Amino acid sequence: MSLKPKIVEFVDVWPRLRCIAESVITLTKVERSVWNTSFSDVYTLCVAQPEPMADRLYGETKHFLEQHVQEMLAKKVLIEGECCHSNGGPDLLQRYYTTWMEYSQGIKYLHQLYIYLNQQHIKKQKITDTESFYGNLSSDAAEQMEIGELGLDIWRLYMIEYLSSELVRHILEGIAADRASNGTLDHHRVQIINGVIHSFVEVQDYKKTGSLKLYQELFEGPMLEASGAYYTDEANKLLHRCSVSEYMQDVIRILEYESRRAQKFLHVSSLPKLRKECEEKFINDRLGFIYSECREMVSEERRQDLRNMYVVLKPIPDNLKSELITTFLDHIKSEGLQTVSALKGENIHIAFVENMLKVHHKYQELIADVFENDSLFLSALDKACASVINRRPTERQPCRSAEYVAKYCDTLLKKSKTCEAEIDQKLTNNITIFKYIEDKDVYQKFYSRLLAKRLIHEQSQSMDAEEGMINRLKQACGYEFTNKLHRMFTDISVSTDLNNKFNTHLKDSNVDLGINLAIKVLQAGAWPLGSTQVIPFAVPQEFEKSIKMFEDYYHKLFSGRKLTWLHHMCHGELKLSHLKKSYIVTMQTYQMAIILLFETCDSLSCREIQNTLQLNDETFQKHMQPIIESKLLNASSENLAGETRIELNLDYTNKRTKFKISSALQKETPQEVEHTINSVDEDRKLFLQAAIVRIMKARKVLKHNALIQEVLSLSKVSFTPNIAMIKKCVESLIDKQYIERTANSGDEYSYMA
Amino acid sequence: MADDPENSVDRPTDDGDASKPEKMFTLKKWNAVAMWSWDVECDICAICRVQVMDSCLRCQADNKRDVMGRQDCVVVWGECNHSFHHCCMSLWVKQNNRCPLCQQEWSIQRMGK
């Protein structure tokens, strides 16, 4: 066979070709040789001399297909006389489906047969993507399509357009039947309905844009409408016979069935739309009903119901879930308030933290179990906890949570019999509560004071635990927050080192001080030691040597430093040998000094003691009292001043040979708490003033409200200032001429360089 | 450090030195607490206006970690006996080799350690 164009008569070739085309499209068997010849027939016509006959071939083929489809419609699908009668119904879908299966397959083969025409003749005329993009579409009605596409288009035109309303009606009936039979529709039937529905898509599949348009207009719209009506109806029925709880269960079940049904019948693009319709009708339209028992469900913590409600409401836009969340938040809040408000007694701080933790854990677990750890619910939990923890008992009273939480840490970190792993766990939990505290600066004050006491009096359970806690705080609040705590901690470890070196030094230089010396050297400024003013004290000569040796050594080691001895924080052991048994007594330095005076005499007046030791009245009283109470010394009068005689009690006995004179020092007094809170206020004022200056320096001019906002965001990490305090700070900065009010506007400030 | 007093109810105290003429009261142990600070006349650095015991303003801003004993932001004394943060002063002398307080020629007398 030659590929050379030749002169042919169209009428000679076409009848033969048409005959083959007919066989192909009806899926009748075609001999391979005939199939092959037909290829060359198409080719010959397309390249015929003197004029190619491609256009004519196209025209004839189109005509042939039109005829064929119309014939199929009449003979195979409609069957005479039954065209629009409903009794022909059940089989219409079946007939359409069979015909479509045949035709859609046949047209694919035919497309193959015409491949030369498609590729050489028609592709050339096709509008390129760019052209269609720029829209210079010459709406040339006679635009030619590839044969496959042409065939599908003809099907749409003559078959679907004609039958559409009938088809859709039958399909919807089919779906309704499936719903009525709980999804047990005969498998074959499902396949037919599915096929018919998809034919609406496939027939336009070749289009680059809007290939779903036919499907959507013809079928999807009516389908959604019908489904919507069905859903509304169902919802009404359910509403009449179920409680909220049952309703939600049913809705979840129906949603599940409907989505499975949609997968069974519909094109994927419809699945979300149908789902949305379903949610709209069952949930969104019935929110009032669903919420009607929300309060009870939350307050009784009916997990299954809450879970269902969450599942049901989840797809609905967020603002609608708010009612559930608000109710939930209120519930946690009221439970939290209930568990912490009634607390009383010595261990209020422990109960406070542990009760709050219980509440937090419980709801955290509930959110994980019921609400899939949804962030909206977690933030509701956070809000609820924060509002409980930061609540002031009354407008005037300060919130004491920060103090409680700090004391709770103190209890944990002090020596106790609890095992270390447990303490560690509790400290970690404690951070959970800590994070909710707004007054973090108050916490820091209390914590650092308690830490100082633990470190100085060596009450810490373990230094590892101390360090761990400081690191946790650092993680939560940053370096600034724990800076001083770190320095305190470091001082103690440096001191241990120093003591060792000092003792080695003593040994090397053959000095025996005769006492066991342990000295802590603290860094000024890092320790919250309250009033650090030095109380005048004439150091007894028994201490002097030790002090001198150490100071000499220290100055050799460091330069430019001076040491101040904090005698009110020192304590030691004194061995008493004047009695029948000898005793070892732990007491404070001042007390040791007092007792040492009795080495040489058995009786002294208060005035004499005070004069010798240079002690002021307050210090003297505070330290003398416990000695008298311990009965080591006797006083001639209750008034420990002036000429009152103090005598050594030579009849003293104690069944313990080692004991301790209690000191009032370690107990926290209410004044101390007050003092802590006041000093926090002072610090806040300074912080706020610094913040204002910093902001104004950067901004130069700023409105009052904008300034307040910036100050609030700067101070958020450590505390929440009240607006009045910020205003006061602004005033004082205006007085100090850091900033001024701008001339033309009352609520604007400008920075003065 | 301190032994728990409860645990040693009936422990006899050192009998060994009973023969010696003994004092009535003997110091056995002393846990002392002292505070160190720079030996300065004015405890605020005149250059950065921060207490000399704290790190200087720059070091604070850089969040320099305090290494053991905080030796990285020390104090320096001039011959005039005025003292500043070493960090502050070493920047100052680049511009003006005089003590900012008394205008004497700056020369270092000693450094804190």
Image (cartoon, coloured by chain):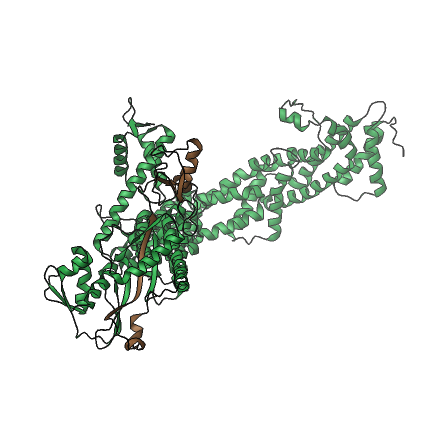
Q: Nearer the viewer, residue A203 or A390?
A: A390
Q: Where is residue A557 in the image (x, y as percent from the top left)?
A: 40, 53
Q: Which of B4 and A156 is in front in this view?
A: B4
Quadrant for residue B93, please give it: top left
Q: Quadrant of the N terminus of chain A?
A: top right
**Looking at the image, residue A265 lies above or below residue A744:** below
Instruction: Name the colour assigned to chain B in the rendering.
Output: brown
**Looking at the image, residue A451 lies above or below residue B80:** below
In this picture, residue A733 sits left or right of residue A503:
left
Q: Is residue A134 visible?
A: yes
Quadrant for residue A724, please give it: top left
Instruction: Name the colour assigned to chain A in the rendering.
Output: green
Q: Which of B1 and B20 is in front in this view?
A: B20
Q: Quadrant of the C terminus of chain A?
A: top left
Q: Position of residue A628 (x, y in %)?
A: 16, 66
Q: Where is residue A416 in the image (x, y as percent from the top left)?
A: 34, 66
Q: Where is residue A86 in the image (x, y as percent from the top left)?
A: 57, 42
Q: Nearer the viewer, residue B8 or A205?
A: B8
In this picture, residue A153 sits left or right of residue A691:
right
Give the total number of marks visible in the rendering. Answer: 0
In this picture, residue A223 sits left or right of residue B65:
right
Q: Is residue A428 visible?
A: no
